[in-house]
Structures are given as structure tokens and as C-alpha cells.
Amino acid sequence: MDFNKSVVIPTLPQGKKLEINILETWGDMNYLGLTGIEIFDELGMPIEIHENQILAFPPDVNVLPGYGSDPRTIEKLVDGQYFTNDDLHVWLTPFTSGEDHQISINLGKFCRVSMIRIWNYNKSRIHSYRGAKLIHILLDGKTIFRGQIKKAPGNTKNPEDCCEIILFTEEDAILEMIDQNDWLNELDVAAEEFDNTQRITEFQGQLEERPMTATKKFSTTEIEELQF
């Protein structure tokens, strides 16, 4: 497949069967992995996908000798835990250069797709090279995306660094609905509240520990540490 040829991303493509074929990893020659797949409809709502609606070939590392009960199976991609590096919430399968590595998702009904978010393999900085690089997405047999997705950093500092967003609409009303229904917004608010609370607590602790000015000479380093 020629990935140099451009593909026109369709507007709100409609279908029932979504297929993702992964052709390249970010460098690992033995394993391929992802952390999650999310799909939003034309109303900006996430499409609920159950574990019996997703399949992969090759299915997972349990097809290899010496495995058999490894938890990194395909249904973990739709278990709702995406911003993570926990082995209990990822998919890992053998990788063979030049061959197809296919994921098939039955959406349950005909849907118009407005956005797909793919969370790449994020176990660690080294293991992030197992993540998908070149992918081909089809909806009911028609290509809706073909190209490169970003490598995850191997940490959970910033969710936007760990996923690739593929939009199939430019309509402001739909984008606004996606934004309203996106669980990441709740995560951002919680992180901001935690950060503010932590900074206030740290500052209060510094005030309590600060001695009288007359009995303490602050070094330049200590002054910088008190600044926000």
C-alpha cells in the first residue's frame, strides 16, 4: 500500500463495520500494541462498544509459545481506560513486518462517524516503540483514513500526547457536542483543581516553616523555590 498517496478524509462517513489495519510500528520489530480506541457519532456522542464487538488478527500475544494467560487482549481497547500505562488495560500482539495486523469493530448499527481517537501503546518510553505508526482505516470497506499516527511518550503526564485524533467533520455544532461529551474535559478540570490545591498546600507549608526574617538569610535558590 502506497502511504505517499493522499487520501481525502470524508465528512461523517457512515457504516457499521470499522476496520483498522496496522502496517508499521514506531520501531519495534516483534510486538505491536495500542491502549484504546474511541469512536464518536454525528451527535458528538461516544459510541459504546462491548468486548464482544471487537476482534483482532493476530489476536494477542497469547498465540505465542510461553504465553496463554496474558491480560493484554483486544477487548482492553474498549474498556474505558485509555490514559494509562497499566498492562491490564492495553492490547499487545505479535508484529511481523510486511504483514497485516487487523482490528475489526462491529459498531452494532449504522453510524455516522465524526471522530476517532486512537490511544497508542504507552507502557514506557522504550516500550512506546511498540505503538502503531502507519494505519489504514476502513468503514464498510471504504477507506476513511490512511497515514501516520503519533507515538505515545511512555508516560501519563499529558493525555493529548498519548493519542491521535482523527476528525471527520468541521461543523462547529458537532465539534461543540464532542467537546461537551468528552471525558477528557473532566480529567482536565480535576487535574487543574488538584494542581491548584497542591500549590496552595505547598505554599502554606512553606509559610509555616519560614523563620522570622531577622533570624534567616534566604539564598537565591530558596527564594526562587517560593515563587510561582
Image (spheres, rainbow, N blue to C red):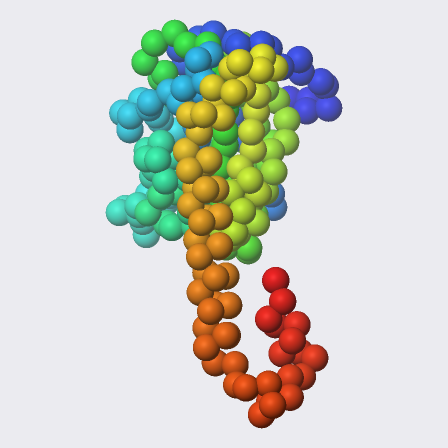
| Quadrant of the drawing holding the C terminus | bottom right
**Residue 204: where, in percent of width, then height?**
47, 69
Residue at (29%, 25%) from the top-left corner?
A: 50
- Residue 119, relative to residue 45: is it above or below? below
Numbered marks: total: 0
Q: Is residue 114 visible?
A: yes
Quadrant housing residue 190: top left
- Nearer-the-camera pick, 91 or 212: 212
Residue at 57% across / 24% down in the picture?
166
Of residues 164 and 205, the one nearer the viewer is 205
Residue 85 location in percent, x, y? 43, 50
In-image side of 121 versus 106 (left or right): right
Q: Position of residue 198 (x, y in %)?
A: 45, 60
x, y (%) of residue 72?
A: 35, 44
Q: Residue at (41%, 19%) from the top-left corner?
A: 45
Residue 123 visible, this orientation:
no
Residue at 57 percent of width and 21 percent of height:
167
